[in-house]
Amino acid sequence: MSIIEANGLARTFKSRKRTVEAVRGVDLRVEEGEIVGFLGPNGAGKTTTLRMLTTLLEPTAGTATVAGADLLRDPVGVRRRIGYVPQAIGQTMGGTDPACLVQEELLDQAALYHLDKAEAPRRADVLISQLDLSGLDQRLVKTLSGGQRRRLEIALGLVHEPQLVFLDEPTTGLDPQSRSNLWDHIRRLRSDLGTTVFLTTHYLEEADVLCDRVFIIDHGVIVASGTPDELKRRISGDVVILQVNGARERARDLLARQPVVRDITVSDDGALRLGVFQGAEALPSLLRVLDDAGVTMHSINLSRPTLDDVFLTMTGRSLRDDSASTRDGKTSKAADGAAAARG
Amino acid sequence: MTFVRDTLIVFRRQLRLSLRNPAWVIIALVQPILYLVLFGPLLTKLPLGALNGSAAAGSAGSAQGYRFFVPGLLIQLGLFGSTFVGFAIISDWRAGVIERFRVTPVSRLAIMSGRVLRDVLVLVVQAVILVLVGLAFGLRAPVSAVFLSLGFIVLVAIGLASVSYAVALLIKSEDAFAPLLNSVVLPLVLLSGIMLPLTLGPGWLQGIARISPFRYIIDAMREAFRGQYANTIMLEGVLVALGLAAVCLWLGSRVFVRENA
C-alpha cells in the first residue's frame, strides 16, 4: 500500500469578497522509502497541500490516507505516525523557540509524542549526534546558526522515528554549504532508516539531485509528475548548438533531414541550434552526416534541459523569478544597516 | 488521562520559560505595588466605610482603607496580568511553535490549558506578594478572606487568559492586539471601582458599571475582607466569577480545538 494516497484533495479559502481555490483536486501516490519533491512557485498550492496532508488544514473536498491512517477520520493517528518540519521563512518560522535550550526542545518534543521518560533522553542524544548538533545541547536556540537551527528543526520532526516526514522548504534561506550538508542528512534518513521523505522546494537543483520523483504543481493542480530525468526527457528534449566553418546553409539542410532533429534555428551569433530527442545518443550520427558531407565544425555543445525548462514548458513561467526568501531579506537588510553604520 | 498529562507537558515548558526570565513576573507587580504604596495612603483619610455601606461610619483608619483598596488591586493585577498573556502566543505562533505542537498527537486544547495553568500559578504568586506588602502597610483582613480572594483571582485568570490567547491567535498581530486590549481593559478597570467606590459616582455611572463582571467580583472580595460572607453580594460575586471563567474557557477552547488555524 502507498504511504500517501490522496484523491481529489482540494481546499477553497472563502473571504468576504472572493473565493480562492488554492488547491483544486490533487491526486498523489507516494510509495514507502521514496524521496518525493513537490515543486512549484509561491502560491501554487504547495504549502496548502502539505498542510492538508499533515492535518493542519481540513480539506474542503477529497480523501487521503497518510501513513496508514485516514486523514479525515483519524487525524490523531496521522499525527502520531508522521513527522513535520514547517518552513522557516515567511510569516511563521520553523517551530523552535529562541528562548529554549536545544536539549529542552528535543525532550519536550519527545514528551509531545508521548515517548517514554527513559526513552526520550536516549532519542535526543541519537538525534543530536545524527544531525551534527553535538556540543550544542545546552545552547539557547537563538544562539544557533541558521544551518544548526534548521537541523534542530529537522531533528524535532524525527524524535518519534516516523515512517514518513514532511519537510516544507527544508533548505530555503541556507547557504550552499549548509544546503548540501542537509541533503546528505535527508538521503541518510532514507538509506539508514527507510524513512519516506516528502519535501516541497522551489530550488530546481534540490529536486533534481535529491528526489526520486517530482510532482510539479501550478495554480492548485499537478501539471506533471515523474522522475527528474523522465520529466526532462518527456517535456523538453535536448539542445545541440553547432558552429560550422562556412557552409552554414548546407549544414542546416542536411541536419534538418535527420529524423532525430525536431527543429533547427540559426541564432544571432550564427550558430545552429537544434532541438533533439535524446541528444547524447543522437550526437554521433549527426556528426557523421556533417563529416560525410565535408562540413567542418568549429565547436559543438550539448545541453541537457533543466527542471526549469520543464517548468517553463508546463506553466509558461520560470521558477527562478520567485526564490527570494524572508530570511535572506532580513540578512541583507541587516548587512545594509551595518554598512550604513560604518559609512 | 491524556488531557491532564498533555496539559502538564505544556505547563512545565511554559513555567520553565517564565522562570528563565523571572524579571517579567516582578515587572508585572511593580504597577500594583506602586499604587498600593503611593496611592493607597490617600484612601486612608476618606470615609470609605460609610460610602461602602459599612457600619463603621466616619473617618476610615488605614486598616479600612486597605481593606477596600487591596481587593481592587488584586483584580487590577489579574485584569492586566491575564489579558496581556496573548502577546506571548503571537510570538510563539510566529516562531512556528504553535503549528509544530498542532502536528503532534498532543491534545490541542492542552496547548491552551497548559499555558493558562502557568498563568494562574504566576498570578497567585503575585497576588500573595501583593497581599503581604499590603499587610506591611496596615491591611488587616481575615485569612479566610485572603484565600477566598485568591480563589476569585484564579477564576478571573482562567477566564481572561483563555480569551486573551484565543483572540491573540485569531488576530496574529501585536500591532492590532495592543490597542484592542487597551480599549477593552481600561473601561473594565474604570467601571469596576478599583480605585474609588462606584457609589461616589452619579446614578448613570453606577448603571453602566453593572455591565462589568469585575465590579461584582470586587464587591464580593471587599465583603470578604470585611468579614461578611453570607449575603447576596457574595453570592453574585461567586456566580459571576464562575460564569465568567466557564464562558471564557469555552470560547478559548473553541479556537484551539478547531481543525484549521
Image: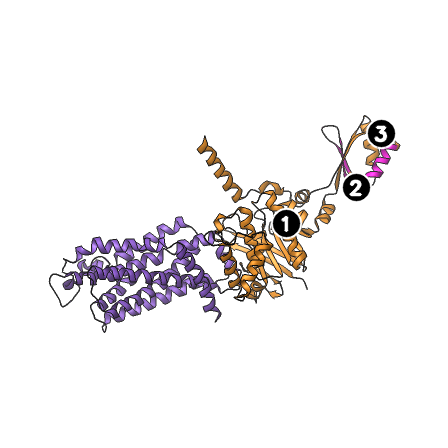
Chain colours: A orange, B purple
Q: Tell me what residue is drawn at x 49 percent, y 48 percent.
A: A143
**Location of residue B161 (image quadrant):** bottom left
**In the picture provided, is B201 more to the left or to the right than B241?**
left
Residue segment shown in magenta? A263-291
Decide which of B19, A86 is in the foreground and name it: B19
Q: Neighbour class for label 2 at 10 Å: few (<14), some, many (≥20)?
A: some
Where is residue A233? Give x, y as percent.
74, 46
Residue at x-position 72% and y-position 48%: A229
**Label 2 element class:** helix
Q: Are marks 2 and 3 in contact (CB under 8 Å)?
A: no
Residue receiving disc 1: A183
Q: From the viewer's perspective, is residue A144 above or below residue B164? A: above
Calculate the distance from the C-alpha at mark 2 to the C-alpha at mark 3: 21 Å
Residue A179 drawn at (x, y percent)? 61, 46
Q: Which residue is mark 3?
A: A295
Can see residue A175?
yes
- Residue B171: % across, % down: 42, 53
N-term-proximal mark, 2 vs 1: 1
Residue position for label 2: A280
Of badges 1 and 3, nearer the viewer stands 1
Q: Nearer the viewer, residue B89 or A313?
A: B89
Residue A282 among those drawn in magenta: yes
- Left or right: where does residue B9 sit relative to residue A291? left
